[in-house]
Image: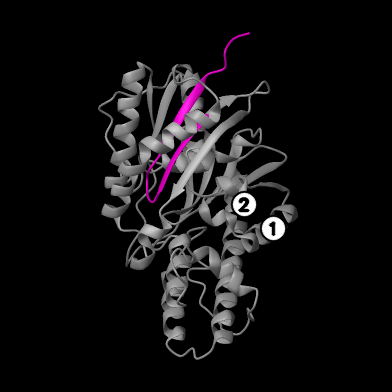
Amino acid sequence: MTKKPIILGIETSCDETAASIIQDDECGIPKILSNIVSSQFDVHKEFGGVVPELAARSHVEKIDLITNEAIKKSGININDIDAVAATAGPGLIVCLSVGLNFAKAFSLSLNKPFIAINHLEGHALSPKLNFKIDYPYLLLLISGGHSQYLSVNGLGNYERLGTTIDDALGEAFDKTAKLLGIEFPGGPKIEELAKKGDPKKFKLPKPILNKGGCNLSFAGLKTAVLKITKNINSEKEKYDLAASFQSTIEEILYEKTKIAFKEFCKKSKKNKNIFVIAGGVAANKGIRKKLEILGNKNNFQIIFPELNLCGDNAAMIAMVGLEKFKLNKFDNLDFKANPRWPLDKNAKFLKGAGVKL
């Protein structure tokens, strides 16, 4: 029996130090042999956000330990590794450099191929760790740094249909949480507070809801939250604002996804289309439920990564590395970190005041 390739994945794009070992199973679905993630919540919580220099220092301190733990937990011998894949962008340059340089040195020491991975491609293909999915499919990528609708046409082949013109959705969640006095990282806790509040208490704006196709905007929503928090005097009002924010986000994504469905269907010839929601914010249960309802109404099969694979992790990086390994797509050791590495290189830059939609 031919040995299935084994890939080591390394991820250090922001504030998670992660390493993973994966290998195809007999059905051709990547099997996660280990997936170790070390978060830095305690390092950054007193600052209310990620401090790049502290994040990079933590990566340096942990990367060797985390990688050794991943190899040990996988049960493989270090020499069984066939290639080393690492996130090369986008992300914080000082953080990317730690994992990238470590992976290069590791691959060199084993005399095995090195593969540079786009972090966003890891999220885009992450459901393939649990499902067999055929191309093309529609993707909503929602995380702390990115919010995009993309047509995923194949490995390395993406067409952006829409993007945020200002803040990413995860950033909007985190900043709203901070305004409500929730300790970093507060974004995931908004949904919990929302369960105790009235979603109709505060009327919040839905920027560019009726224009701009399936492009998104969250900066105006965040500003509205800031104004309201200055007049909040009780815990009940805090819960109401969290509920109103959660509900508004769900409504924005519902309406914008309807537009994305139409755009995607113009290009897809499939009878049953697939809609993947990935990235850290894809763990939000309210958003999941709302988009599942919409998908069912429009003949789209809805797929989410497992909850532990929504946030940053190295299994998704190793998985893309495995796909590239099969095609002999390797990279040189002089490959540089790219903090701004888009999936669709032909898409226009849409960000900042005065953007024309």
Residue, disc 1? 294
Image position of 316 (left or right of 54): right
Q: How crowded is mark 2: few (under 14 residues within 10 Å), some or many (20 or more)?
A: many
Could you tell me which quadrant the C terminus lies in? bottom left
Q: Which of 157 and 10 is in front in this view?
A: 10
Image position of 246 (left or right of 48): right
Asked if one can make out residue 330 in the rendered structure from this viewpoint, the answer is yes
* Residues rendered magenta in the picture: 1-21
Magenta region includes residue 357:
no
Q: From the viewer's perspective, is residue 210 above or below residue 13?
A: below
Label tally: 2
* Residue 173 position within the rendered picture, expressed as x and y whole percent measured from the top left: 48, 66
Give SS at disc 2.
helix
Residue at (32%, 51%) from the top-left corner?
Answer: 55
Could you tell me which quadrant the N terminus lies in? top right
* Residue 327 position within the rendered picture, expressed as x and y whole percent measured from the top left: 48, 19
| Residue type, mark 1 in image | Leu
Residue, disc 2? 261
Question: Disc 1, disc 2: CB below 8 Å?
Answer: yes
Magenta region includes residue 17:
yes
Asked if one can make out residue 338 in the rendered structure from this viewpoint, the answer is no
Residue at (30%, 23%) from the top-left corner?
Answer: 332
Residue at (60%, 35%) from the top-left corner?
Answer: 128
| Residue type, mark 2 in image | Phe
Give SS at disc 1.
helix
